[in-house]
Image (cartoon, rainbow, N blue to C red):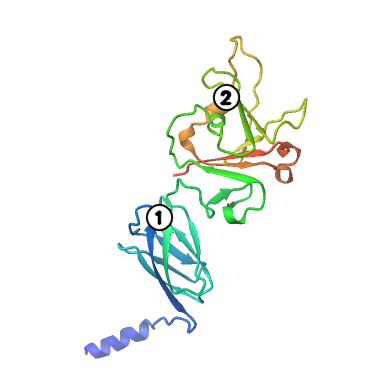
Amino acid sequence: MQHGFAQSVKSVHPSITKPKDTLQVSGVILDVVSKRPLYGVYVSYKDYGAAITDSLGHFSIAVPNMQITLMVKAEDYNNQQVALKGRSSIEILLQKSGAASFYNEIVTPSRQVSRSKITGAMDAIETKGNWNADPGSVDNFLQGKVSGLNVIRRSGTPAAGANLYLRGYNSLYASNQPIIIVDGVYYDNATYGASLNKGYYNNPLSFIDLKDIDKITVIKDATSTYGSKGANGAIIITTARA
């Protein structure tokens, strides 16, 4: 009776066979600093195969050939692409998310793109909520973090903000500051009117809580995307999402 039941189950649930050209790649994933194994790291190749590392950092994944590139993703670590180059066993070292990586994704006006595929003049800053000190506003925070970006503080008054200039001055009469995009929406950063208090300036960027910011992308030449408004560049701010 048991034999007959097993035969009926087998007929209802046919076995799934892998393609004949499937190969197996195994490896271990470690932290680049401590060299400790990383658990729960997601390793994949397009829609072909995927695997998750065990408590010892080991994984095994099916691949069509030994010349493909694996995508490695882990929480609190930078994404990484690893080319097999004929290897069937590999060791992968991951960096913490605070470190700069060639494979991190950059927020562009149209989508998120891997840094390795960016051809334009862009810089990206990932805050990840790691604020060692409160700079007061977004413009002050950018000081010294982007090449070619001049940050000139308006005064020593708290929250007065700063003037931002990408690649110097472009006009004697028109605005020389880049446009600000927050979560895909134009953000008016102009200062209207004058204060009765000397040295005080209105800074619209001070209304953005720094701890809500996830990524900042600085585009040094945004004319092709935003037209004449982007002649002075663009700063794209992406807030954190639950």
Q: Which residue is mark 2?
A: 161
Q: Is residue 127 left or right of residue 221?
A: left
Residue depicted at 54% across the width and 18% down the height: 156
The spot of residue 148 in percent (x, y) is 64, 37
* Residue at point 54%, 26% (across, down): 206
Q: Nearer the viewer, residue 224 or 70?
A: 70
Residue 114, visible in the rendered structure: no
- Circle number at residue 68: none
Give the mark toward the camera: 2 or 1. 1
Quarter occupied by residue 130: top left
Q: Quadrant of residue 196?
A: top right
In the rendered view, does 208 fall on the left or right side of 235?
A: left
**Around disc 2, counting alpha carbons within 10 Å, would you say few (fewer than 14), some (14 to 19), or many (20 or more)?**
many
Please tell me which of labels 2 and 1 falls first in the chain: 1
Q: Quadrant of the C terminus?
A: top left
Mark 1: few/some/many CA within 10 Å (<14, 14-19, 20+): few
Residue at disc 1, secondary structure: loop
Q: Amino acid at mark 2?
A: Gly
Please give the name of the residue rendered at 67% of the width and 49% of the height, measured from the top-left corner: 120
Name the residue carrying label 1: 32
Q: Secondary structure at mark 2?
A: loop
> What x and y, as percent, mark residue 71?
49, 62
